[in-house]
C-alpha cells in the first residue's frame, strides 16, 4: 500500500516536471563530472563501471574526498516544519513523502507558514542524535538546513523565516549539532535545496490562493541573480559559522536553474573553502560525487557516488508510515553500496518534538553492532574486484586483503572465489583466531567454512592475498 503511494509520488513528481533524476543527477545534464580518478594503489581496478575517469584538463579538484571515501556510511536527517503535520492535513493522509506536504496537500503559504508557531522541539538533544549516529557506525551527518519549503533550520540573517526567529523554541539546532559533531568526531554536513517554495524570487508551478502547486518553481522575471545572492549569503553562514564539510544540494530541477548558476555557486563555495565537498545536484555536471536515490546501482558507478535511502517510505517524519525496512536489509544495502565503490546515506525523520523515531534508532543500532564486528570490511575499503555478482554475497578489498561478505551461507560449506591469487590466510572477522582451510580448485580458490554462519545478516571472511586481485575471467 505505502509503496504504491511512493510510486504514485514518483509519477506525480515526474509529471509535475521533475526532471527525471538518473542517479540523482538531472538526466538532461552532461554526464561529465569533475572528480579525481579513484587512485587504486595496489587494488584491482577491473571492477565494472570503474572506467578510469580522467580529471578534465585544467580543472583542479581540491575537495577533501579522503575522509568521505573512508567514511562509507552517513546519516541523512530530514527535519523541518513538515515534521509538524507529519503526513496529515485536514484530518487526511497526504501523499508521501512527508517533507512534500506543502505541495502534495496544496497548502497556501499563509497556512503553511503558521506551522512555525507550532514547531517547539522541546525534546531535541543534539548530543543524543550524534551519539545515535556514532553508535550506528555512521561517520557523517547531512541535515536539511533548508528544504524545498524554504524554512531555514539555522539562525540565518538572510530571512526571518527560520527556526530561531519564527518558532516559540528560539533555539538553533544546526549550531548545536555542529558543536556535538565536532565534540564526538563526526563530520557535520548540510543539505540545501535550490528550489524554494517560500522565496518571492521563485514562482510556484501553479500559483493559487486556495490550492497551489509549487513544484517545479521558476524564477520570477529577473530575480535569478537576487536569489543566487540570497543563497550565497546562507551558504557563507553555513561554511563560516556552522563549519559544514559538505553541501548536499537538491531541487536543481527548478526551471531556470542552469549551468551559469551552477558554475557561479560552485565557484563561490570553492572561493571560501576549496576543501568542501559538493554533490552533483548542484547541477550541470558540476560536483564531486553522484547521488542515486532509493536504489543501489547493481554494478556501482564510476567515480565517487553515494546512495541515499529512507528506512520507511518518507524522508520527513510521517506519523502513519510504519513500513520499516529490517536491519538485515539495511546491512545488505550498506554492503552492496561499499562493494560497488559507493557510500550509503541512510535517512532518519525526527518528529516535531525533536525525537528520532524508535524503529529508526533500533535499526541503526543493529547496523552499528554489525559494524563493530565487521567494520574493517567497510571503512576505507574499495569496490569489489569482480565483474559478475558473487553467488554467496559481496566482496570489498583493501591492500593485501579481500573481504567476502557472505549473505547466503552455502550448504556445501565451501566458497569458490573466482580469482587466481593464492590465499595466504583466511579467517572470519567474527572470530579471527580460527584459521579457515583453503585450496586451489578449477573455479578459483576454495574456502572451507564452519557449519553455521556467525551472523544471520552477513558474515565476513577476510582473505590475505599477495598483490592486486586477479579475477578469473568467465
Ligand atoms: O524532493 C527531494 C526529497 O524531498 C528528498 O529531499 C530527496 C532526498 O534525496 N531529494 C529530493 C527528491 O529527489
Image: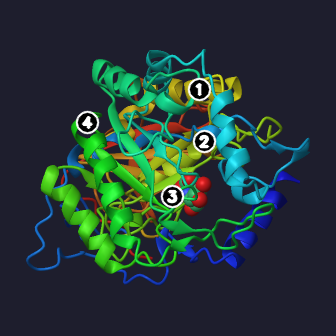
Report the Cα–Cα distance between label 2 and label 4. Answer: 30 Å
Proximity of marks 1 and 4: CB atoms separated by less than 8 Å: no
Residue at the (79%, 42%) spot, across then down = 323
Proximity of marks 1 and 3: CB atoms separated by less than 8 Å: no
**Would you identify the image quadrant in which residue 406 lies?**
top right
Among numbered discs 1 and 4, the one appearing first in the sequence = 4
Tell which of 82 and 337 is nearer to you. Answer: 82
Q: Give the number of the mark in front: 1 or 3.
A: 3
Up/down of 197 relative to 239, above or below: below
Report the Cα–Cα distance between label 2 and label 1. Answer: 9 Å
Would you name the residue on which mark 3 appears?
199
Q: Give the number of the mark in front: 3 or 2.
A: 3
Would you name the residue on which mark 2 appears?
330
Report the Cα–Cα distance between label 3 and label 2. Answer: 37 Å
Tell which of 269 and 445 is nearer to you. Answer: 269
**Would you identify the image quadrant in which residue 359 lies?**
top right
Report the Cα–Cα distance between label 1 and label 3. Answer: 41 Å
Q: Residue furthest left?
A: 58
Among numbered discs 3 and 2, the one appearing first in the sequence = 3
Crowding at dot 3, Cα within 10 Å, few <14 / some 14-19 / many 20+, comes out as many
Q: Give the number of the mark in front: 1 or 4.
A: 4
Would you name the residue on which mark 4 appears?
243
Residue at the (33%, 40%) spot, across then down = 71
Label drawn at residue 366: 1
Proximity of marks 2 and 1: CB atoms separated by less than 8 Å: yes
Residue 80 percent coordinates (x, y): 58, 38
Q: Is 30 positioned to the left or the right of 316 in the image? A: left
Secondary structure beneath label 3: loop
Amino acid at each position: 500500500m505505502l509503496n504504491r503511494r511512493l510510486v504514485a509520488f514518483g509519477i506525480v513528481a515526474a509529471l509535475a516536471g521533475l526532471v527525471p533524476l538518473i542517479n540523482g543527477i538531472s538526466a538532461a545534464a552532461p554526464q561529465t563530472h569533475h572528480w579525481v580518478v579513484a587512485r587504486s594503489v595496489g587494488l584491482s581496478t577491473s571492477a565494472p563501471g570503474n572506467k578510469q575517469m580522467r580529471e578534465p584538463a585544467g580543472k583542479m579538484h581540491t575537495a577533501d574526498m579522503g575522509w568521505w571515501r573512508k567514511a562509507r556510511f552517513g546519516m541523512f536527517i530530514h527535519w523541518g516544519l513538515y515534521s509538524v503535520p507529519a503526513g496529515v492535513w485536514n484530518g487526511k493522509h497526504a501523499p508521501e513523502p512527508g517533507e512534500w506536504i506543502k505541495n502534495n496537500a496544496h497548502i497556501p503559504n499563509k497556512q503553511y507558514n503558521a506551522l512555525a508557531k507550532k514547531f517547539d522541539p522541546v525534546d531535541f538533544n543534539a548530543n543524543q542524535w550524534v551519539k545515535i549516529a556514532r553508535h550506528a557506525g555512521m561517520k557523517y551527518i547531512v541535515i536539511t538546513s533548508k528544504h524545498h519549503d524554504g524554512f531555514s533550520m539555522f539562525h540565518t540573517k538572510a530571512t526571518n523565516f527560520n527556526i530561531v526567529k519564527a518558532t516559540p523554541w528560539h533555539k538553533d539546532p544546526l549550531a548545536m549539532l555542529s558543536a556535538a559533531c565536532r565534540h564526538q568526531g563526526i563530520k557535520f554536513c548540510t543539505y540545501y535545496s535550490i528550489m524554494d517554495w517560500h522565496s518571492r524570487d521563485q514562482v510556484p508551478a501553479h500559483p493559487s490562493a486556495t490550492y497551489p502547486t509549487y513544484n517545479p518553481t521558476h524564477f520570477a522575471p529577473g530575480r535569478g541573480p537576487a536569489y543566487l545572492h540570497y543563497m550565497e549569503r546562507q551558504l557563507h553562514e553555513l561554511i563560516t559559522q556552522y563549519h559544514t564539510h559538505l553541501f548536499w544540494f537538491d531541487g536543481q530541477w527548478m526551471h531556470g536553474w542552469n549551468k551559469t548558476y551552477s558554475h557561479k555557486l560552485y565557484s563561490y563555495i570553492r572561493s571560501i573553502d576549496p576543501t568542501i565537498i559538493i554533490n552533483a545536484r548542484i547541477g550541470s555536471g558540476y560536483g564531486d560525487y553522484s547521488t542515486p536515490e532509493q536504489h543501489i546501482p547493481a554494478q556501482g558507478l564510476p567515480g565517487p557516488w553515494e546512495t541515499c535511502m529512507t528506512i520507511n517510505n518518507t524522508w520527513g517524519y510521517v506519523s502513519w508510515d510504519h513500513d520499516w525496512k529490517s536491519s538485515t536489509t539495511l546491512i545488505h544495502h550498506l554492503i552492496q553500496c561499499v562493494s560497488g565503490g559507493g557510500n550509503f546515506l541512510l535517512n532518519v525523520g525526527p518528529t516535531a518534538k525533536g525525537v528520532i523515531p524508535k524503529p529508526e534508532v533500533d535499526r541503526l543500532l543493529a547496523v552499528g553492532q554489525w559494524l563493530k564486528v565487521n567494520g574493517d570490511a567497510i571503512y576505507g575499503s574499495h569496490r569489489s574486484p569482480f565483474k559478475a555478482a558473487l553467488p554467496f554475497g559481496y566482496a570489498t578489498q583493501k591492500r593485501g586483503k579481500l573481504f567476502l561478505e557472505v549473505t547466503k551461507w552455502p550448504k556445501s560449506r565451501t566458497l569458490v572465489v573466482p580469482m587466481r591469487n593464492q590465499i595466504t590466510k583466511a579467517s572470519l572477522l567474527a572470530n579471527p583466531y580460527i584459521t579457515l582451510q583453503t585450496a586451489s580448485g578449477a573455479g578459483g580458490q576454495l574456502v572451507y567454512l564452519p557449519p553455521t554462519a556467525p551472523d544471520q545478516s552477513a558474515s565476513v571472511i577476510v582473505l590475505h592475498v599477495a598483490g592486486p586481485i586477479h579475477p578469473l575471467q568467465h
